[in-house]
């Protein structure tokens, strides 16, 4: 018999059986089996009375690993739907949905139920129905059951209840419904809920009204409305002195205004009484700008942001991060002083291209990772131990090249004899200049970058382009001007001495990177870095011994390939065994005479409530500007004395390793980079944001303002 015929006959038999049962099943539930789900109507009455209020449950029993959905299904899905056909004079309340759970599905997140779930509905009988009649109740149900694939289901279910003068209870289902209702989401007057809408997040704050109210240890938000939050993103719960906060990433596609938020707060364990772990709430939503001290305006005209970016790029050349590469480029000036105008123009264009390509790559990477839910900012790559190892090896090899250990022409750095190779060196110098500049920020940069990473892609790229143009401008102006090139010394033997001296600057940079790596990932990571540098030195020796132009082509090629393989093997081997970045040890305690405490939003809120003045230092071990400020400004005896006199609390927000809390705190000030210094007066007044570059005078002047 064909398969379709078998299925048809089976359905006929099932329907016939159901029809046969209908008249006889006075109080029995009807049941239908569909793909991966059994659906039943159950009632807490054997017989109803006129005007009686009773409960009917829609029960779904699901096969293992299959699930159905809550009212908000999450990233995909559809909640079960039920349409009643009731006797005249009867009415039904909406279905009550039990507490849902988070159900991961690859990169997505669903909200729903697995196993067995019962949805309840209150039915009110007509007051004028006569005893002896029968109440025929019909329910048209459809649902979506999913595992990896999804299968829609539908059924027509019915109950035939006798009507008597006195209702007769079904003890089994009445007690079962009591248990279910005791676990339904509940409201509570013990908690005040408020929500702030931040640029990328929702911040939910719960404040305890009653001293007896117990806070949960962790919970998740289930909003009633679809599309508001990033359902799969991590939700950050933190306890506060009077309740708790929950930060949830906003759905990047959600652009509507939001005045209130409805939903559930679901804990893993009971926290609202026995069996109660879900709080149903409605909370007002305020925009972050209503209450946050956002200093960097997002309403700046685009031309002003581009100007800020260009000027910031210009000043970036004066930051200590760029010094090692600046020395290399200085040697390039000497070489170019003796070349034709066309050759100089080619060098400049390639250098500019190297800078711009690097900035565009950084911008694109930042935007892609942020779109994926990462909390990143300027200099984020230096929060990666692997990147630090690769950058250290790169700088180490350039240093060995300057020392003359090998010759991939000195042209690698733009001072070689081969013109074509020298041009490649100009491009590489542009790339290197950008990479090593990322630990620093310059005045005007913070505002421009904070603006750029909250804008559409094209505007962000325009801002990064202006930043790159500003950074490359001084080099291009100097080398394009014959008048300025006249001041460049003539080439000679002194260049070799200068070149080797510059190699020590690069080695000093490697030492600094190793120090940063040690803070991020510990002594083991530093040891692995040294192994990587050792393999690089072996490769450089091979290249210098057998890879020079004086050696025949075949052994030279073998040496070059061998050196490349040694470097790759060393870096891959070390990177694969690096420990992950850990939360950097906050340099609390005495540093430069100031007693620093670890930063936390809770500590800031507490100090603000107490009316204490406070200073927040957003810093990182890889931020050279930060280190300079610490030595120059916070190392000043006068500054330390004034801080003590004002009884000012100093907090250090260490961003050496990735820290979502600090990234969010930076974002609240319109920034995504360090350094950032925020000074709060003790009178609840508005905070003062200090410049990126500090002097003792600047800090003392700011302290005088909060004193007044």
Image (tube, helix red, strand yellow):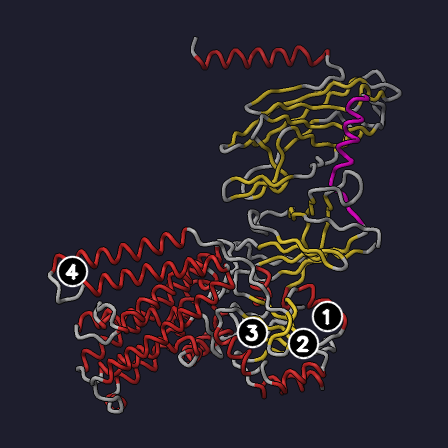
Q: Does the magenta-highlighted stretch encompass residue 182? A: yes
Q: Which image quadrant for residue 594?
A: bottom right
Q: Is residue 350 visible?
A: no
- How many numbered dots are placed on residues in this image? 4
Instruction: Count neighbours of disc 2 (C-alpha within 10 A) and say few if under 14, some if 14 to 19, many if 20 or more.
Output: many
Q: Nearer the viewer, mark 4 or mark 2?
A: 4
Left or right of 549: which side holds 220? right
388 w.r.t. 469: above or below: above
**Mark 3 and mark 4: span between their CA atoms?**
51 Å
Residue range highlighted in magenta: 171-188
Task: Tell me the residue that label 1 is attached to.
Answer: 607
Of labels 3 and 4, earlier in sequence is: 4
Task: Tell me the residue that label 4 is attached to.
Answer: 556
Q: Which element is circle 2 on?
A: strand
Closer-to-camera residue (251/473): 473
Residue occupying the point 65% across, 75% down: 615
Q: Which element is circle 4 on?
A: helix
Task: Tell me the residue that label 3 is attached to.
Answer: 676
Residue reaching furthest to the left: 552
Tell me which secondary structure the magenta stretch mostly adopts: helix
Q: Does the magenta-highlighted stretch encompass residue 185? A: yes
Task: Tell me the residue that label 2 is attached to.
Answer: 680
Q: Nearer the viewer, mark 3 or mark 4?
A: 4
**Label at residue 615:** none
537 w.r.t. 82: above or below: below
Q: Which element is circle 3 on?
A: strand
Left or right of 625: which side holds 13? right
Of labels 2 and 1, earlier in sequence is: 1
């Amino acid at each position: 018999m064909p398969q379709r015929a078998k299925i048809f006959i089976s359905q006929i038999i099932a329907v016939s059986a159901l029809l046969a049962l209908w008249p006889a099943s006075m109080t029995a539930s009807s049941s239908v089996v569909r793909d991966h789900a059994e659906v039943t109507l159950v009632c807490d009455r054997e017989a109803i009375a006129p005007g009686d209020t009773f409960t009917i449950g829609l029960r779904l029993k699901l096969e293992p690993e299959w699930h159905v959905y809550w009212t908000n299904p999450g990233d995909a899905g559809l909640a079960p739907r039920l349409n009643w056909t009731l006797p005249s004079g009867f009415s039904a309340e909406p279905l009550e949905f039990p507490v849902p759970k988070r159900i991961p599905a690859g990169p997505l997140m669903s909200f729903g139920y697995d196993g067995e779930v019962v949805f309840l509905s209150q039915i009110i009988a007509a007051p004028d129905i006569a005893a002896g009649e029968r109440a025929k109740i019909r329910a048209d149900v459809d649902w979506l059951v999913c595992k990896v694939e999804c299968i829609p289901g539908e059924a027509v279910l019915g109950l035939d209840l006798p009507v008597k003068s006195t209702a007769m209870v079904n003890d089994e289902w009445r007690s079962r419904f009591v248990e279910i209702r005791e676990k339904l989401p509940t409201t509570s007057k013990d908690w005040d809920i408020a929500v702030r809408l931040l640029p990328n997040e929702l911040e939910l704050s719960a404040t305890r009204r009653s001293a007896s109210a117990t806070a949960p240890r962790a919970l998740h938000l289930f909003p009633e409305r679809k599309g508001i939050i990033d359902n799969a993103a991590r939700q950050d719960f933190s306890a506060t002195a009077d309740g708790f906060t929950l930060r949830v990433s906003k759905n990047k596609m959600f652009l509507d205004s939001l005045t209130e938020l409805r939903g559930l707060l679901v804990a893993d364990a009971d926290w609202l009484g026995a069996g109660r772990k879900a709080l149903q709430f409605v909370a007002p939503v305020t925009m972050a700008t209503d209450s946050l001290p956002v200093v960097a305006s997002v309403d700046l005209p685009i031309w002003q942001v581009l100007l800020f970016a260009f000027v910031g790029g210009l000043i970036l050349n004066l930051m200590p991060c760029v010094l090692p590469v600046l020395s290399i480029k200085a040697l390039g000036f000497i070489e170019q002083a003796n070349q034709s105008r066309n050759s100089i123009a080619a060098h400049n264009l390639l250098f500019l291209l190297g800078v711009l390509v690097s900035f565009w790559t950084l911008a694109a990477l930042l935007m892609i990772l942020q779109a994926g839910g990462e909390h990143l900012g300027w200099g984020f790559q230096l929060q990666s131990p692997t990147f630090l190892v690769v950058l250290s090896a790169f700088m180490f090899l350039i240093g060995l090249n300057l020392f003359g250990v090998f010759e991939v022409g000195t042209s690698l750095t733009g001072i070689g004899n081969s013109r074509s190779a020298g041009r490649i060196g100009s491009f590489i110098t542009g790339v290197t200049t950008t990479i090593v500049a990322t630990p620093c920020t310059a005045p005007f940069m913070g505002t421009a970058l904070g603006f750029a990473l909250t804008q559409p892609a094209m505007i962000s790229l325009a801002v990064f382009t202006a930043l790159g143009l500003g950074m490359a401008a001084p080099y291009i102006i100097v080398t394009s001007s014959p008048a300025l090139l006249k001041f460049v010394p003539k080439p000679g033997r002194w260049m070799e001495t200068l070149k080797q001296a510059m190699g020590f600057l690069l080695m000093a940079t490697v030492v600094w990177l190793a120090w940063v790596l040690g803070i991020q990932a510990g002594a083991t990571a530093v040891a692995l870095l040294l192994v990587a540098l050792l393999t690089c030195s072996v490769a450089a020796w091979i290249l210098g011994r057998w890879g020079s132009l004086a050696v025949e082509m075949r052994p030279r090629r073998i040496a070059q390939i061998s050196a490349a393989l040694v470097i790759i093997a060393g870096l891959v081997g070390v990177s694969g065994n690096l420990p992950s970045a850990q939360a950097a040890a906050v340099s609390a305690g005495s540093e430069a005479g100031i007693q620093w405490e670890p930063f936390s939003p809770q500590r800031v809120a507490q100090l603000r409530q107490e009316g204490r003045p406070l200073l927040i230092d957003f810093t990182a071990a890889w931020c050279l500007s930060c280190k300079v400020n610490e030595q120059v400004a916070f190392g000043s005896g006068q500054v330390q004395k004034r801080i003590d006199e004002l009884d000012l609390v100093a907090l250090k927000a260490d961003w050496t390793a990735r820290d979502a809390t600090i990234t969010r705190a930076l974002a609240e000030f319109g920034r995504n980079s360090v350094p950032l210094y925020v000074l709060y007066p003790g009178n609840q007044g508005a905070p003062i944001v200090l410049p990126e570059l500090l002097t003792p005078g600047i800090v003392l002047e700011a302290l005088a303002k909060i004193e007044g």
